[in-house]
Image (cartoon, helix red, strand yellow):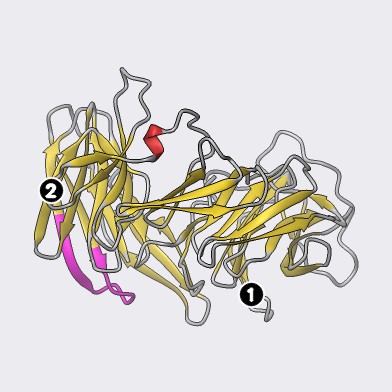
Amino acid sequence: MAATATALPHGIDHGDPVFTETVLLRRDGTLVTSLLDEGTWDGSGGYASLGLSDRGMLVVAGSRGDNVQTVVATAEGVLSTTIDVVPVAEPAPSGHIAVRVVDPLSADLDLLWLDPCTGNTTLTHESERELRWSRRSWGYRLVYPDDPDPSKLVLEAPEGIERIDLGEEGDLEEIHPAGYALVATDDQERVLLVDLNARTTRAITLDLPLKSMTTSGSHPSGVRPTSDGRLFVPMRSDSLGYLYVSEDGSDWSPVGLPIGEVYGAAARESGGTFYLYGDANAVTLPAWSPAPAGIARLDHNSIQVAREDGTSIVLVDNPFGSGTLDAFRLAADGGCVSRESAGGLSVTSLAEGTQAIPLADPEAYDPVDAATFVPGEDVLTWFP
C-alpha cells in the first residue's frame, strides 16, 4: 500500500521547512520506493488525496496555503507537477487522470484529463454538459447521466465515452468500486442496480422489515450496493441493531455482531467483508430496550468488520469515546482494513490479525495524511 507522512514538529513557525514523504510499502511494511516533497510552512494546507495505479504510478495531491498541486511519479522519479488541479478518480491504464480545477475565485467546476508525462490537460466530455448533476467516479472513469437523455448513463474514459441504457430516468446515488451503481427512481421504494462491467440494469423493489439506522449514504432508505451486486443496510429492532444484506430487497440476512445504544450506524462492504460503525456521538440517543438474555451486544461507539461465514473482528470498542472512529479503508479484495494511527498505519488482516507499521514520529503533529491499498480501488468507510 501507499501512504504519505508529513513532518510537522511541535513549535513549527511560518517559513520553517516542511518535508512530506510518500512511500510505497509491501504488506509486511518493507519499503519499495519513496517520493520526498520539500517546502516551507505557512500555517495551512495538507495532502488532499493519494492515488496508486496497478502499474505503480503514484498520484499525490496537496496544498500549502494557496499553492495547490498534483504530483505524478513512479519508482524512477517525478513525471510531472501540475498546479491548481486535484484528482477526482484513480489513474487510468494509460496513466491519464481525471482532475478538477481548483480556483477559489471561480465557480467553474471543469473536469480535465491530465497527461501524467507532460502535465498538459484536455477538457472532459462531462464538462460540456448543460446540466452538471449527479456525477460520480468509478476507478479511473467518470460516470454521469446523459445530457439530454437522463435515461442513459455515460461512462467516460480518456479514450472516449460509452452509454448504458437504464430504461428510465434516475439519479445516480453511488458507485461501488467493484462496478455496481445505485440509481434512484421516482419511487423511493424502487431502485436500479446497474452492473457497469456487464452494462446491464436490474430494478429492485425495497421492502425493509425493520427501521433503517444509517447515518451515511445518499438514498433515503440507506441501502448501498455490495461488490457482488446485492444491497446492504444497517437496521434495528427495539433492542438489536445489525447489518443486513439482501439479494432481492425483500429477504434480509444479518451479518456480524449486534449493536445497541447508538444514534445510528454507518456501513460499507468490500470483497465480501462488511464494516459496521455504531455511532453514539449525539446529545440524545433514541430509546433502546435491553439486549435479550444470552446475546452480547456492542453498546455505544464500536467498529467491527465481519463476513457472512461468521468471521468477525471488533476493531474499536470504545463505548464513550468520540472522534473520527470511522476513518478506515477496506482493501478491494476485503482481506484487510487499515487506519492511520500512532504515527503510522494499523493494518488488520481478517486472517492474520493486526500489524502496526510505523512511518513517522507519533509526537509530530498529524504525521500521516493519507493511505491507500494497491491498486487504489479500496473503499473509504467515511465517504460519503
Q: Where is residue 52 in the image (x, y as percent from the top left)?
A: 30, 60
Question: In the picture provided, is 124 more to the left or to the right than 241?
Answer: left
In the picture of the structure, the residue carrying the numbered disc 2 is 80
Mark 2 lies on a secondary structure that is strand
Amino acid under disc 2? Ser
| Amino acid on which disc 1 is placed | Arg
Tell me which label, 1 or 2, sits earlier in the chain. 2
Q: Is 351 located above or below residue 68 in the figure?
A: below
| Residue nearer the viewer, 65 or 343 | 65
| Residue 47 visible to an observer of this rendering | no
Q: In which quarter of the image is residue 17?
A: top left
**Residue 104 in the image: above or below residue 100:** above
In terms of depth relative to the viewer, which is nearer, 278 or 291?
278
Residue to which mark 1 is pinned: 307
Q: How crowded is mark 1: few (under 14 residues within 10 Å), some or many (20 or more)?
A: some
- Where in the figure is residue 191, as x and y percent of width and height? 72, 51
Q: Do labels 1 and 2 touch, CB within 8 Å?
A: no
Using residue 105 as the reference point, say whether residue 252 is left or right of it.
Answer: right
The residue stretch that appears in magenta: 24-35
User: Is 269 in front, or is 259?
Assistant: 269
